[in-house]
Amino acid sequence: MAFDKASITGIVLAGGRAQRMGGIDKGLVPLCGRTMIEHILDKLKGQVGGIFINANRNMKTYQDMGYRVVRDNDDSYAGPLAGMSSGLHAAETPLCVTVPCDSPLIGADIVQRLHESLRDSGADIAVAHDGERAHPVVNLMGRGLSASIDNFLASGERKIDRWFDKHNWVYADFSDRPEYFINVNTDEERQEIERGIYLDYV
């Protein structure tokens, strides 16, 4: 399974409530002169054949960025799996990669490295790991897993790691680039990036 970006759809997850940031829409938080999601879209667009944004509010703002926007299937804010399901259903490529809207430092090689782990292992899902902890919302999976997610959510489950355990999955090692997965969950974390600590990546 050779790496072919045209066979992969990117799904940027921006559908959460962002309760740790006071309920604001994290994808639209300004960072170094642009919104956080714009940093991610710029990094991701050269790595995939197309991109969807999963969002449940500010739909027009996201649409104006030039990408198709897909909402969760209901209004329950059921977590990242709900956004993944919507993206998988909308996609037409065999593979989909998901990334959160609050990790603006993702790298330009993240999709290829996830793909290598998926290919070399023969697994259904490749999940990013920074050497210390997993980042389950950064993953590459087959589009055909949408029905499995839907059934899992319909059973009342939401925890992404419990869903992973129903499938053959593997970690993709990013221990050499842990900064890819720095989340901006507070205004202090946003300011830390703006002070230039990781400026080479934004």
Image (cartoon, rainbow, N blue to C red):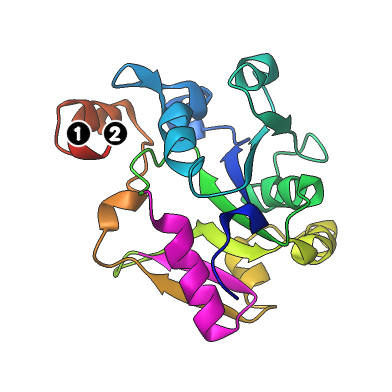
Observer-nearest of 144 and 76? 144
Q: Amino acid at mark 1?
A: Leu
Placement of the N terminus among the 4 image quadrants:
bottom right
**What range is drawn magenta here?**
108-129
The numbered mark at residue 199 is 1
Question: Which residue sits at x=23%, y=26%?
Answer: 191
Quadrant assignment, res 29: top left
Q: Which residue is pictured at 46% across the width and 27% down the height?
A: 38
Callout 1: few (<14), some (14-19), or many (20+) C-alpha neighbours within 10 Å?
Answer: few
Q: Which residue is mark 2?
A: 202
Q: How many marks?
A: 2
Q: Is residue 53 left or right of residue 127?
A: right
Q: CA gap, disc 1 to disc 2?
A: 6 Å
The residue at the point 65 percent across, 75 percent down is 124
Q: Quadrant of residue 183?
A: top left
Mark 1, secondary structure of its residue: helix
- Mark 1 in CB contact with mark 2 (< 8 angstroms): yes
User: Where is residue 57 shown, x and y percent of the image?
Assistant: 67, 22
**What kind of residue is marked 2?**
Val
Residue 150 vs 169, above or below: the answer is above
Position of 138 relative to 199 (above/below): below
Task: Please provide percent x and percent y for residue 173.
Answer: 36, 71
* Horizontal side of residue 109 vs 116, given as left or right: left
| Residue 135 in view of the camera | no
**Front residue of 4 and 45:** 4
Classify residue 112 as left or right of residue 86: left
Q: Is residue 127 magenta?
A: yes
Is the C terminus in the top left, top right, bottom left or bottom right quadrant? top left
